[in-house]
Amino acid sequence: MNSMKLWIEEAVEEILKRNTDRIVINSGKSISGRIHIGIFRELFICDSLRRILEKKGFNVEFYFILDDYDPAKRFPAYIPANYDKYIGVPFSDIPSPFSEGESYAEFFANELTSTFNSFGLNPKILWTSKLYKTPEMKNIIRTVIEKVDEIRRILINSVGETLNEEDAEEYRRELTGRYPVNVVCRKCGKMQIVDKGRITPNRVLNYIKETDEVVYFCHSCQEEFKEKLDEARLKLTWRVDWPAKWFLLKVTCEPAGKDHTVKGGAYDTGLRICRDVFGFEGPVKIGYEWLRYGDVDMKTHKGIIFTPREYLEIAQPEILRYLIIRTPPSKHISFRPELLPQYIDEYERFERVFFDRQPDASDEEKYEARVLYPLTIVNSNIQNIKPRLPFRFAIIFSQLKDIMNPQTILAKAQEVVKKIYKIPVITESELKEIEEMIRKAENWVLKYAPENYKINISKSISDDIKESLTEQQKTVIKKVIETLSQGEFTEEELQNKIFNIIKEIEGLNVKKGFETIYMVILGKKYGPRLGSFLLSLDRDWLIERLNSALK
C-alpha cells in the first residue's frame, strides 16, 4: 500500500475532523472588472474537495459569493473615462458600460460564470448585495454593533501589530470613533470618497438601540443622516464582513490567497472574530500561491488579465484543471500560453497512467493519477480515454488551408484519430471535438505559438533552395519519397525511418538531414515534429513536392 499522501487528501482529513453532517465549501470574488483565470485556483480547489467529499457520502454545499457590494475605488483602463463619477458607488449600483439592463457587477460576473459549465463548475451563486438585505445579515450587523468593543480589541491587536507606532495610533483612533459598518448614503448613493488615493468611507457613528437607528456621516454630501437599521444600506468593513459570511453560511472550508492567509493576516483575524464574537469555529484555512500569467501577477482592477473565455479559445478546460489540481497550493503556478503543447503532452501522459496505458509509470505517478485524474475531468462519466486529435496534429492541420480544402483537412484529421486509437469509425461527437481542437489550435498559433510551430507553405520551391541541395540531401529526399510510397506508418514509425535514412548517408549529419525536408516544404530549417507534420499533409501532394525539389 502506498504511504504517500497528497495535499488534497490532507485537506479532506482536516475538514472531516469537524465531525459535521453538512459541509459548506465557500469561495468569493469582488467584481471590479474583467475577472482573470487566477480565481480558478480557488474554485478548482473547492470543487475538488466537493467531489471527494460527495464521493465519500457527505452532504456538501459549494457557494461562490460575488461581492457586487464593494464600492469602486478606481476603474480599469478599458472602462469609459466618464465612469469616474461612479467612484465610491457599489458595483451593484453602477450601470454596465457594455450592456443594457445590467449592473457593472452583473456584466462582469456573468462573463465569468457563463464559463463555469465548460470548466465543470456548478457552485450556488450568492450576491453580497442580496445577502445584506436578509434579516439574518441585519441581525449579524446588530451583533457587531453590540460587541464592537470586542471587535475593536481583536482588530487593534492583529492589524495594529503590523503597523508602525504612528500608523497604529491613528488606526486605534479611527476604530474607536466609529463602528466597523459602512453605509451607502441614501442621498448620493456613495459608500466612500477617494481623494488623491486616500479612501474615506461613510461609517456608522452611533446606534440608537431604542429606535433601532444608525447615525452616519456622508463624506460626499458632507451631511449627517439617521436611518432605521432595517432600511439603511449597510455593509460591514471587509475584515468583519468575511467572518460574518462564514458565520451566516456556516462555512466549513474556504481557500484564500497568500496575501490573506499569512500568519496574523486577515484570515486569522477573521477566525478570531468568528470564535469570539459569533461563537462559531470558522472554516478550515487553505492558503494558496498565485496563478500567474507568465511572469506577471494578474490584477482585475488594473486590467492585467487573461480571462477564462480567452483560455477556452485555445485549450481544453481539463488542462487548466490539471495544472491547478496537480500543483500543491503552497507552490505558485505560471501559466504560459506558449507552452500549451507541453502542458497537453503532460496531461495526456497523466491520463494514460490513470487508464493503465503507460508501462513506464512509477508507483508514485499511478497513485497521484488515481487520486487526481478524476478531479481534472469535466465530465465525470468518462470510463475510458476519449479518441481525440492530438494537439500537435491540430496545430499543423489548422495551417494547411492554402494547400488543402477544409473537407480534406477534416478527413486527414479523422484518419489520424482512427489510426492512433485503432477505431473503425468516428462518431458525430468525436468529429465535433476534432473540429473544435483544430479551431483552438488555429487561435493558439495566431496569438501565442513560438516560431517553430508556424507553417507557411509556399506554392513552389525557390530556385535558391533547389540549387543549394547537396547530393547527400537529394539522396535523403529520394529515400523519403520511396518510404512514403511504401504504405501506412504511425508518426513514430515515420520519424524513426527518416532518422535511420539520414544516419545511413555518409557525410551527412542528422540535423542537416532533417533541415533538408523542412527547407523543401516550408522554406526554412525548422518546423513541427517531422513525423506528425508529414502525416498531416496530403500524400500525393507531398510526394509531388519532394519530387519537384529534384528537378
Image: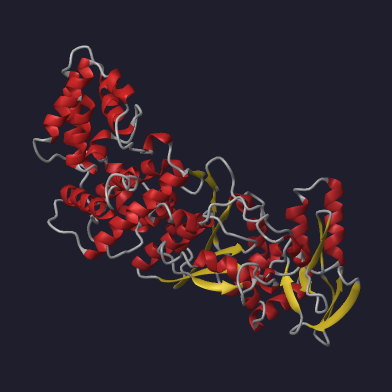
Tell me what residue is drawn at x 53 percent, y 72 percent.
125
> What is the x, y in percent for residue 18?
49, 65
Q: How many labels does the image show?
A: 0
In front here: 289 or 301? 301
> What is the x, y in percent for residue 362?
27, 40
**Among all residues in the image, which is located at the extreme top?**
507
Left or right: where does residue 221 sit relative to residue 344? right
Q: In which quarter of the image is residue 428?
A: bottom left
In the picture shown, does residue 159 fall above or below 502?
A: below
Q: Quadrant of residue 433?
A: bottom left
Q: Can residue 14 be seen in this view?
A: no
Q: Which colour scheme is used?
A: secondary structure
Left or right: where does residue 240 sit relative to residue 112? right
In front here: 267 or 122? 122
In front here: 20 or 337? 337
In the picture shown, does residue 391 fall above or below 531?
A: below
**Among all residues in the image, which is located at the extreme bottom?**
211
> What is the x, y in percent for residue 408?
23, 52
Left or right: where does residue 61 sit relative to residue 102? left
Q: Can residue 397 be seen in this view?
A: yes
**Among all residues in the image, which is located at the extreme left?**
486
- Quarter of the picture containing the C terminus is top left
Tell me what residue is drawn at x 23 percent, y 27 percent.
549
In the picture shown, does residue 117 fall above or below 521?
A: below
> What is the x, y in percent for residue 503?
19, 19
